[in-house]
Image (cartoon, helix red, strand yellow):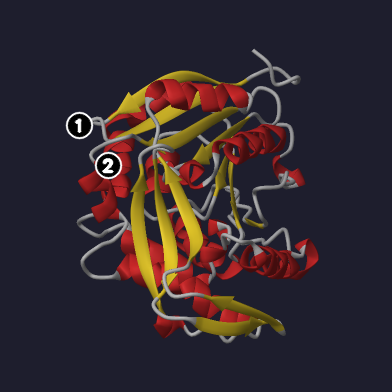
Amino acid sequence: MATAALLIDEDLDDIGLGSQFRSDVLSGLSQARKAIPARWFYDHRGSQLFEEITVLPEYYPTRTEVSILTEHCGEIAQAVGRGRVVVEFGAGSATKTPLLLDRIDAAGYVPIDISGDFLRESCAPLIARYPALPIHPVEADFNAPAKIPQALAGRDRLGFFPGSTIGNMEPAAAIDLLRTMRETLGNGSMLLIGMDRIKAESTLTAAYDDAMGVTAAFNLNLAHRINRELDGTIPADALRHRAVWNDERARIEMHLEALQDISFTVDGYRFAMASGETIHTENSHKYDERGATTLLLGGGWEPRCIWKDKEDRFMVILADALGPDLTA
C-alpha cells in the first residue's frame, strides 16, 4: 500500500509571487480608481478568516454547495468515472474535498494554492484520512499553467474548483482562467466547478457584510498584509469595509473606503486617498445557467450536468474539455 507524502512541488520565491504582489499593489494603488486583485487576500491570516466566513449564518454559498455535493455525489461519481487525478484549484476544504474523494476512485490528488502554509495545513488531515492516495500539493498561482507532478502523469484529470471563486473575476479574466485550467488539465479532462446564482440583493449583501464583522476583518487584512510585506504605512483604522450590489454587472463589490483624507507609503512610494475614496478589492459575479454556460464554453469547457439546490441559490457544474483548439 502506497503511503501519501506531503511534497511541495513549487517554492514561493522560485515562482516570484512576492514580486507579483508588489507589482499588483503598486499598480493598483496608482490607478485613478484604486483596485487590488482579490487573490492577494489569501495570505495565511486571510485564508483563516475566509474559513471563518464560510460558517457564518449569513454566508450561504459554502453550506449550500456542500448540500449539493452531498445529495448528488453518487451521480457525480458515476459521471466522472474511476481512476482520474483530482486537481483542486485552491487548497482543499475540510468539508468539500472529502465529499469528492470519498466517492471517486481517484488515482491521485493535487491541490494547487498560492499560500504554502495554508496548503500544508489543509493537506495534513487529508493525508491522514487517505493514506493510500498519492497527494502532491503544488504551491503556485493557478492563474498560470501549472505542472502536474510527474508521478501522476498519463492519467485523465478532474479539475475541482468549488466555492464560486470563478465569480471573483471579470468575465474576460474568468475565461482566461478557464482556458488556463484547460491547459493544466489537458485533453480528456473534466471540470467540476461551483457557481453562485443571482438572487435577492438583501441576501447577497448580508452574505458579504456579516453582523460579526468577519468579512470586514478579511477585507482589512489586505491592508495589514501590505503593511507587513511591502513596508507599508496604510492607516487601517482609517478604512472601513463596504459591500455593495452592482445590478448592472450582476456582482457584489467589496471596497476599502477611506473615512478621512489619508496619505501613506508602500515600498517607498507615496499614495493618498480622499475621504470617501475606495480601494476596490473584490468582485463576486453571480450567474444564471445561460451565463454560466456561455462562460464555460468561452473557456474551453462544455457543460455536461448541472446540479442545483432546491432554492436555486447555487449550482455545481460538471463540464468536459473541448478539443485542443478550445472550440466546440
Badges 2 and 1: C-beta atoms under 8 Å apart? yes
Instruction: Please tell me which residue is depicted at 28% across the width and 47% down the height of the picture.
Output: 204
Residue 234 visible? The answer is: no
- Is 126 in front, or is 213? 213
Q: What is the three-letter code of the residue carrying label 1?
A: Glu
- The image shows a total of numbered marks equal to 2
Q: Check disc 1 and report its element: helix, strand or loop.
A: loop
Q: What is the three-letter code of the residue carrying label 2?
A: Thr
Crowd around label 1: few <14 · some 14–19 · many ≥20 (10 Å): few
Q: Quadrant of the C terminus?
A: top right
Horizontal side of residue 59 vs 196, given as left or right: left
Residue 240 x %, y %: 37, 73
Instruction: Please tell me which residue is depicted at 65% across the width and 85% down the height of the picture.
Output: 231
Residue 64: which disc? 2
Horizontal side of residue 69 vs 18, given as left or right: left
- Is 62 in front, or is 112? 62
Q: Which residue is mark 1?
A: 311
Residue 145 x %, y %: 73, 44
Instruction: Please tell me which residue is depicted at 54% across the width and 69% down the height of the picture.
Output: 43
